[in-house]
Every structure is written in structure tokens, then in C-alpha cells.
Image (spheres, rainbow, N blue to C red):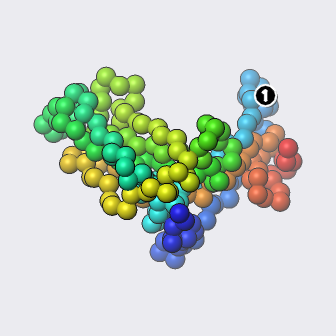
Amino acid sequence: MPSRHPQHRTVQGRPTRPRPLAPIPFEVEAVFPELTGTAREVTLLYPRAGQPGPGDSSLGGPLLWPADEPWPMCAAPDHYKPLSAPVGPEPVAMVPVVQLYARDVPGLVFPAGTDLLQILWCPLIHEDDASAANPRLTWRSTALTAARAAVREPPRPHTADEEFLPRPCTLSPHRQWNTRTGTCRRDSASCSASGSRT
């Protein structure tokens, strides 16, 4: 279910493609020898303000959601909005935070039979939770979900802490890793500084 919106846009005339990383000005392992051998590949998401669709990997964008699955609500008795009256156990609609398709993050290991990760959270503070926003992770199969995807807008929370409402952003993931003298992009023909690809 691809989105009609392109993944790369311009904002006020500026390109939204990933910016190149500045070279590391020193040899990390020489300065921090305890880090020797600990380098690993990571995926940088490069969020940019845009209009992602449910078929896109996104930050704060619409999710590919099954029509027959209720939208998650949070009814924690202790959640609240700072400087506001207590919310109590009244249910509050959770909000989309991240949606990642396996095709965009090849370094992320998905459970068998899934290729879509969705993260939502409650847009309120939770004192008794290890994470203030009480996140919820869901792993899905794109094919199975698209076959019964909802076309309606999800419910909006009737109250929320603005800091927990992500602005919709497109993502341009790139796998990168550290070398002895710089940082490389997996899709780049060369490395920054004088490092070599491994």
C-alpha cells in the first residue's frame, strides 16, 4: 500500500535528503581504548517534516492499521498532563510515534512472519511506569494488514502533553558504521576522513 507522497521533499526550498556526516576529527579508539572492538552498524532515520502516508516508514505519521482492530487506548489511573487537573482512569487515545517497514531498515531484526513495526504511546505522563509515555510496540505482516486496512482517521486524544505529540515526518533511513578514522554510509562509495569500509 504505497503512499502517493514521495519520500524526499523540499521544505522552503531546502532539500530534505540526508545530510552527510562530518568526519570524526580523531581516532576514537585511541582516545577511548575501552571502546576497541565495540563498533557496530546502526541505522540513522533522518526524519524530515513532511506528509507520510500509511505505506511509508514515518515518525508521527499515519499507521497502516487493521479496520477490525480497536485503536489502543490508555486508561492508566496515574496518567496526567502537567499543570492540569488529574485525568484519572479516563481512557485517552494513544498516538503514533514510529512506523518502520523492514524494507527501509534492513539492519533491524523482525520476528518471523512480520515486516512492519509500529510504536504508539500515551501522550500523558505516567509516574509509576519505567517510560513516562507508556509506549506500546506492535509487529505486523504488511500483506495481512493491508488486506484489511482501515480507511478512517484514528481517534485523537481528548487531552495530551504537547511534548508527546510528534510532528509528522518522513524518514530516509541509512545504515552507517564507525571506522577507525571516520563514519561510512553503506550506500556510499567512500568513507569520510581516511577510514576504509569494512
Residue type pointed to by label 1: Thr
Residue at x 28% of width, y 36% of height:
74
Say whether residue 5 is left or right of residue 95: right
Frontmost residue, 110 versus 160: 110
Residue at x 62% of width, y 61% of height:
18
Which residue lies under the disc numbered 1? 36
Residue at x 81% of width, y 53% of height:
191
Residue at x 83% of width, y 59% of height:
189
Q: Position of residue 188 (x, y in %)?
A: 78, 58
Residue 168 visible in the picture: yes
For the C terminus, the quadrant is: top right
Q: Position of residue 169 (x, y in %)?
A: 47, 59
Image vertical order of residue 25 relative to residue 128, above or below = below
Name the outermost residue toward the bottom: 13
Find numbered disc 1 in the image and state the secondary structure of the residue it sits on: loop
Say whether residue 117 is left or right of residue 79: right
Q: Position of residue 137 (x, y in %)?
A: 47, 38
Name the outermost residue toward the left: 85
Report the number of discs: 1
Say whether residue 37 is left or right of residue 151: right
